[in-house]
Amino acid sequence: MSTFVIGESLVDVIHSPAGVTRHPGGSPFATAVGLALLGRRTQLLTRIGDDADGTLLRARLEESGVELVNGSVDNRPTSTAHATINERGAASYEFSLVSDFPMPPEDPALRAKIQEHAPRAVHVGSLGAHLEPGRQAVLEWLKLYAGRSTVTYDPNIRLNVMGSAHTVLAQIDEMMPYIDVVKASDEDIAALLGEISPAEAAKYFLNRGAKLAVITRGPEGVLLATSHESVALPAAMVEVVDTVGAGDAMTAALIDGLGRFSVLGGEETAHIADLSAPVLRSLGAYAAAAAGIAITRAGANPPTRAELQAESELYAR
């Protein structure tokens, strides 16, 4: 299964009680790495500087097996996020970044060739889907792959960088015609919509065309909902090192899991809306296990398929 991820790459500068460390990061970057570690052929369209931090990012992509799309490296500084980890392992961020990605080709023959070989899944989200000029590139790629690829979206809201909730909601409405699966955290929902229930949050995205809405609730677990079914699952019980990249590990596992159930790409996408409660429960448990592994180690560090298989025989196939 081929996957195509569009969005920011950056270096997480982690400030914790143990000191300061630097880790490859960025939500789309970490999702791409997570997909590759789960054995999926993955391409990443992003922006990385030709500098020391860029070298760190490219090394991580190469090590993980992610293919960096041509045009993703330029001579501007690599973006950074300074993350401060509190005593509970939760992170707060300050960003220095540029969101700017290559546009799809204008030549009709090249566009037709790209569409002919469309990936099964396209993932977008986070700062890259909301900051200009990168946001326009994301929209154009979504339009190019419309009806050919299953599109997943993780808002990963940072209003101090993205702007007002009103602005972000308007941008989400512009993207929703192209989005099939939304994975959002309860913190994302609170920032955008206020204190509403997970079920109400899921309904918000389902009413706008999503076939599946996944609402994560940290230690309270996760809700998966379609227009027909809804299941709630507990979070994995593990010792938390930090939560950096946990949501991205979950996103990667969700996409991989949907691929395991053969509902990604073209006409197969429609079947996501018909997933049964047992399938949703299996999908959610798989994704929660991936997040559970990620939070037991520092930085954006998603699990491999072998690590997930070691968690339970349910994930062995």
Image (cartoon, helix red, strand yellow):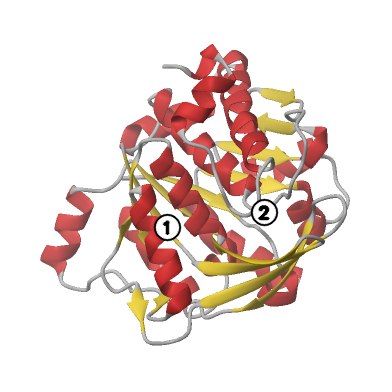
Mark 1 surroundings: few (<14), some (14-19) or many (≥20) residues within 10 A: some
Q: Residue at x 63, y 24 (%)?
A: 285
Which is nearer the N-term, disc 2 or disc 1?
Answer: 1
Q: Which residue is mark 1?
A: 60
Residue 229 can be seen, yes or no: yes
Mark 2 surroundings: few (<14), some (14-19) or many (≥20) residues within 10 A: many
Is 2 on the left-hand or right-hand side of 290? left
Where does the N terminus fall, quadrant-wise? top left
Is 208 on the left-hand or right-hand side of 178? right
Q: Amino acid at mark 2?
A: Val
- Give residue 131's position: percent from left, percent from top: 56, 75
Q: CA distance from mark 2 to mark 1?
A: 16 Å
Is 155 on the left-hand or right-hand side of 240? left
Q: Residue at x 82, y 55 (%)?
A: 190
Q: Residue at x 55, y 69 (%)?
A: 11
Comparing 39 with 179, the one in front is: 39
Q: Which residue is mark 2?
A: 244
- Give residue 171's position: percent from left, percent from top: 59, 67
Q: Secondary structure at mark 2?
A: loop
Comparing 83 with 171, the one in front is: 83
